[in-house]
Structures are given as C-alpha cells and as structure tokens.
Amino acid sequence: MSLTTLGSGDTTARVEETIKRRGADARAVAMMWTSLAAAGGLLAVVAMFVTWYADIGSATAWFSGFLPPVALLLVLAGAVVLVGKQFNLFGADRRVNSDWFTFAIFSGGAVLLMARQLTRGGLSDMVYLLLVPLVIWTFFIGRSVGKPSRSVMLELEQVALGLATVGTGLVIVKRLLDPEFATDGWVWGVLAGVAVVTAALAASQYLGTLSLFQVVLFVALALSVIILVVLLAQVIGDGWPVLSERLGDFWSGTLRSRSEDEQLGISQGILGSFWIAAFVVLLAFPIGIAAAVYLEEYAPRDPANFREAVASEGGLWLSRRKIRLWFGSRLTTILDIVVRNLAGVPSVVYGLLGLFLFVKSVSVINFFFGIINAIFGGLFWVLQQINLVDGEYEDVLAEAGQSSLFAGGVTLAILVLPIVIITAAEAVRAVPDSLRQGAFGVGATKWEVIKSQVLPFAAPGILTGTLLSLARAVGEAAPLILVGAITGRLAPRDSMFSGLDQFFGQFADRFTAMPIVIVGWVRNSGVDEGFGPAAGAAIVILLVFVIMMNSVAVLLRNYFEKKRA
Amino acid sequence: MTSVTSTDVPAKGKTLSIDETAQAAEATTASDVVFQTKDLSVFYGDFRAVRDVDLDIHQGEITALIGPSGCGKSTVLRSFNRMNDLIPTARVEGLLQYRGVDLYDPKVDPVEVRRRIGMVFQKPNPFPKSIFDNVAYGPRIAGVKNKGELSDLVEASLQRAALWDEVKDRLSASATGMSGGQQQRLCIARAIASSPDVLLMDEPCSALDPIATARIEELMAELKHDYTIMIVTHNMQQAARVSDRTAFFTAEVDEQNDQRTGLLVEYDATTTIFSNPADERTENYITGRFG
C-alpha cells in the first residue's frame, strides 16, 4: 500500500500489492465505461422522446396517445433508482432486489418504447443495426483471446459497451442535427432498446449483481428477443388488413392471379403443407428414429474388436469374422460422418435431388406409383367384392414426369431425415447406462431393453427433436420451388373426400404449400401491391402453425419428463 | 465372447436350457458347487484385466470378493452372469462352469444366464417407473401376464427384500422418489422377482449410509437360505460380518507397459482369511499394511 511496503524486499507482499493495484485499475476503467454506457443509454431514450413529441400529431396508432408518457415514466423511474443507487440513497441492504427492480423497469420501458416505434414501419436504415453484430463481435473477441487476465476482460467488455453507447449516441446526434434523417421510427426503437438493456445490464454488473458472463448471456438474449419482436411486429402490421377484414375468406380461398380477387386465399397452401407434414411424419420419423436406435445401440463401433480378432487369429488369415468386424466398425464411422454432413447440406440441394429422382426420373416415379397403385387397386377390389364401391379402378397415379405432391412430400421427408436421426441419436445416447444394465441384469434381451427402457427414457428428447424438424419441413420453400410447387395460379381441386380416386389422385397432382404461396405473393407484390398484405397474413398464419407445433413439442416433452421422474 | 452381437443372439443351433443341462450335470457330480472356475482370465481387448482365477462357489453360502481397487473383483463378478458381454471388447478365457455347464459355451444364451443369475449394482438403479412395475419387470419379460400372479410375485419379492411394509400403500408411486437404501432394496426385490438361483452383488452398500447398509446386510443373511450370494465389497468388516467364504484379490503391476492385472491370492473360509491367512499379502491387506 505504502511506498515503504513497495520498497521492501518482501517479494510476496510486492506481488500481492501489484495484483491489488491492477484490480483497482480495472475497477476504475470498468466504472468509467459502465457509467458512460448507462448515460448513453439514458440519453438515447430521452432523445427519442424529444423527437417523438415533435411529430406526435401525425401518429395514428390507438396507443400513441398514452404510450409515450407511460414509457417515459417507467424509464425515468428506472433512472431515478439507478442514480439513487449510485449515491446509496436507498441503503445498501436491499441492493439485489432493487437491481432487479431497476432492470425490470428499464426493460419494460424499452419494450413499450419499441412497440410505439414499431408502428411506424419501413425497412430503411438497416445499416445502423450493424452495431448489433459489432457488439457481439467485441464480446466474442473478449472471451476468446486465450485466457486473458481479469482486467483485460473487463476492459474489452467495457469497450464493447462503450461502442454500443457511442454508436447510439452518434445516431442521436445526427438525428438532432438533421430532422430528415432516419424518420422511420423502428430503427430508433431497436437502437434504444439495445442501449437501454445494455446500459441496465452494465449498471447491474457494476453494482455487483450480475457477473460478466451473465451480462453477456442477457445481452445475447435481449438482442435476439428484440430482433424477433421487431420482425413479428412488422409482419403482423403488414398482414393486419387481411387478417382483420376477411380472415374466413382468406382461409378458404385459393391461389389467384389478381390480388383484388375475392377468392384469393391459402386453402391450397394449407392443404399442401398438411400433406407434406404427413409425409414427414410417416416417412422421416419412423425411419429416422429406427436409424438412430441402430446407430446408437447396435452398430459395431469399436475397432478394438478387430484388433482383438487379429491378435487371436493371426493377422494374415482372412476370416469372415475379421472382415465383418473391420467393415462393421469402419462402416459405422462412415455412416456417422455421412449423416452429420447430410444434415448440413443446403436444402436447395435436396430440391435438386427431388427434382431428378421424383419428377424427372420416370422409372423411379413409376416404381413408387406402381406400389401405391397396387395397394390402392387391391383395396378397391376388396371394397368392390363387398359391394361398397362401383365402377372400375384406373391407375390414378399413372402420370409420371410431372411435379407432384408425392415428390414434394418425399423430398422434404428426405431433407429432415438426417436431422431426425441426429436428434434422436443424441436422445438415445443420453439414456443412462445403469438403466440398460439393470434391465439386462434381470434377463432382458437387447430389444426388450430398448423397448422398455431406452425408448421411454429417450422419448422426450426424440419427440422434441422430431417435432422441431417437422416445423422446419413445413417452413421450407427452396426445395419445393425446385420440385415444382405452383407459385402462380392453381386450379382448385374437387374436395379430396369426394371419392377414393380424388383422395389418392391428389398425390400425383400438382401442388403448392404455405412457404411457396408466401414466396409467390411477395414476388408479385412488386407489380400488384395488394399481394403485400396477403403475404403478411399468410406469414402470420404459418408462424402460428409453427409456434403451435413447437408448443406441442414443449408440452409433450414436459409430459414425458414428468412421467419419467 | 464370440462377437459383439452375442449379447442377445444365441449361437445358431439348439439353445441349451440351463435347467436341463444343470439337472444332468447334478446327477453326475452331485455336489453343492454352483460355480467352478479354472484358470479364468478376463480380457479387455488385448489387455488382460484378471488372470488365473480358481474358485468354487458353494450353494447357499455368501462368498465375498475383497481386494484393493483395480484388482478385478467386479470384472470377475460380472463374468459370472455374462454382464461383461455388454462391453464390446471384453472376452473370457479359461473355464467357468455353472452347475456343470460351461457358461461361455456358444450354445448358452446369455439372456437365460442373466435371468438365472441376478445382479445388484453398485449404485441403486431403479427404472423410472412405478415401484410395482420395477419389481414386475423381470416376470413380465419372462412372460407372466396374469395380473393376480404378478401382484402376488411383487408382494412376495418385496417382502423378501424387507421393503413391503414401507411401500405397500404406494406401489404405484415412482421408484425414483425413494431413499437410496430403499432403492437398493427395491433393486434386490427386482432381482429376486425373476426367481434367480444366484445373486451377484457389486458393492451394493457403497452408496448407502451405515443404517441402510445394516439393513442390506440383515437382508443378505436372510436371503442366503434360498439364494447363493456373491458380493464384491471394499469394506472388510462387511465381508467378515456377512460372508461364509472370502476370496482375496490383488493387482500386480507390469512395469513394461504399466498395466495392472488382477489375480486371486487366497480363497478360504472367512474365519480363516481374517484370523489365520495363509498368504502374507492377505495378512498385510486385512491388517491395513497394504499400500
């Protein structure tokens, strides 16, 4: 501490003293940067209000009247608490609670502000969002520079916070000087949200509530939530006219060439997506789960078996057992690698595969349709014998060489198959070995162990993974475009329940799906503006379905986990 | 160990029923020896984990396997019901007979072996199912479908495991909610329910407190009237308390490749081992002078 200590010959004390000083240095830097970040964030919020009140007259949203004052109150309250804490106005003992209180108030205010700003719409000024990756990037560098000392970490972290603050501040200054600049409010909303959250987190780290790592996690979470909220609000805003005025007609309508058409709607897209989902459930799920169980439970893995066989039989003798063991363990490794790589193949490539295999390749498609025709023909014959149907069965799936619902469904099933395998294999791998041993120990066979212990225990994980992959298949557009889904106009079919021929016939017929409908409408909206709201509404409906699917996945997971506990 | 798949697929041809062959063998040998091993070695790949084990395990007795860590006690125990088959690289050499039948004969089905020779593991491993379903698991896979018969079996097994009074009102409750000692007794009940001939216990009390340990030890004394029991334990007092015979294993270190191979040092009546051991290494170990 004192000069005499530093000058003395005691090395240990000197090293300790140096560490202390380095710590004090770091704390000072941290304090300055966090204060700056917090101040910058507050400044951003205040500036937003100033500019808002300047053009409040032109705002039309129903909540534009009372939202800004409420948000302002919240943010001011948060600021008072924050400043008060700096000077210990509330006493030190209620520190943790009041930190969370501050954080809650700040984020509440920020969310309200953003909601207000989002109603302005528009996609310009995206460039200022570059600040977001910049912040993430700086954090990333900070964490990955070898194993930096505590003080270096602190400095890098403060640099990140500072960058965010300075960036926001620059935008604000520019706005204040130039009223024409960045009049689209939602960019401001994002920036302010980021600034406020970052500042609040920086403050709570400075006050000692959160560790650096927690702050990084919270910032990452806040960024993703903010971006998601922005996108959602944008889409809902776009589709609102359709959703609020003619949802029923929109639901039952079909693809049309003009947006003013009263019958414009998504029923064909919904039906196509439903059948694609059915193909995925019927093809990819059973095959994928079975493949995962094979890979994890049965596939020979250990090359040591082969070495042992060589040791016991001699290396030169080429026995069947040695061939099997060598090939077996290598094959498993190769299969593992192939599956993992397939999961990373771009979906367009699967579209090409589907195009050549199920659309262009007449012999392949005839093979599959032949099987289906045989099954259906047999069924038809039986029903005819018991006088349930009249007439002759014609091969309804005889047409080959054109785009079909069958091709689309099978292509997407193949697309998600590797994902299903990987997630299911991971769930199976997570089953504790003690369960397997316990079951083997009372004389269960391998399949009994898998059926009664492994699969029930892995069920939550398998279900979550498979349902998430189903959501992916339903949202996938690129492969369907290649396989030839219809984007323009598709003549409505008769009801699929009007006869068995109709029911099976639709699989050989041309088709469309929700993502394809959206792509088509978005493209047409350049020529015919009315397609814009329709596309927005279709996106919202697709999102609702995907979110429902994911919720079902979560509920099922919780249910099975409860059951297994 | 013939191949990876031998865990559930018996070799082609007629699978020998252990019962039939055991009866035939009993008629000729007429002894109370349940297991007989001669020059038994267990390998993991090229590595020999245990060598030259000669043991005669007697009917209706508790045999304890003791020794320092890494001397292959558990490995030997697990080779008695072919649990080692589950480790792909494991392999057994030498003779291991169960009532006159070579356990590693290609015609012997390991699933049948494990049904006859039950096992209790170091860490209690109840299935994440109800208490009833845990105990009924073995009988069910063995084909018992009748509900009344099943519940009789479950009750009898839980009573034998001294657990019935504690759980009879909550048979449908999850087994994972029980205490550690209860879970281990449930695992014993689960093993008993398959009506095995032998019970192998691999350090069954190492995860339990002294009270639960005492209960398990009492239980073993009860069970030995009906089952032949083999127990691996690190606790020498436990071996001295519960067992009739004790086998002492130790490990020798091969300086060249730094591998430890276990071997059987001495096998005798427990009283002899603990009062008057023949081998110096045994004496050093039980008196605590072993490093």
Image (tube, helix red, strand yellow):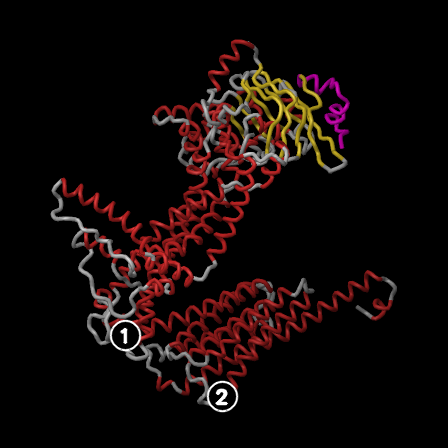
Residue closer to the observer: A421 or A238: A421
Q: Where is A378 relative to A144, above or below?
A: above
List the residue tagged with mark 2: A176
Q: Disc 1, disc 2: CB below 8 Å?
A: no
Left or right: where A495 falls relative to B157: left
Q: Residue at 27% x, 49% y: name it.
A: A370
Residue at position x 63%, y 29% in the image: B42
Q: Residue at x 64, y 70 (%)?
A: A156
* Subunit bearing disc 1: A
Image side of residue A25 versus residue A189, left or right: right
Q: Which mark is residue A241?
A: 1
For disc 2, the neighbor class at 10 Å (few under 14, some 14 to 19, many from 20) is some
- Check disc 1 and give the amino acid type: Pro
The three-letter code of the residue at mark 2 reads Leu
Q: Picture coordinates of residue A364 (x, y %)? A: 33, 53
Q: Determine whether A384 is above or below A61 in the image.
A: above
Q: Which residues are magenta?
A: B269-291
Name the side, left or right, on which B130 lies relative to A507: right
Q: CA distance from mark 1 to mark 2?
A: 34 Å
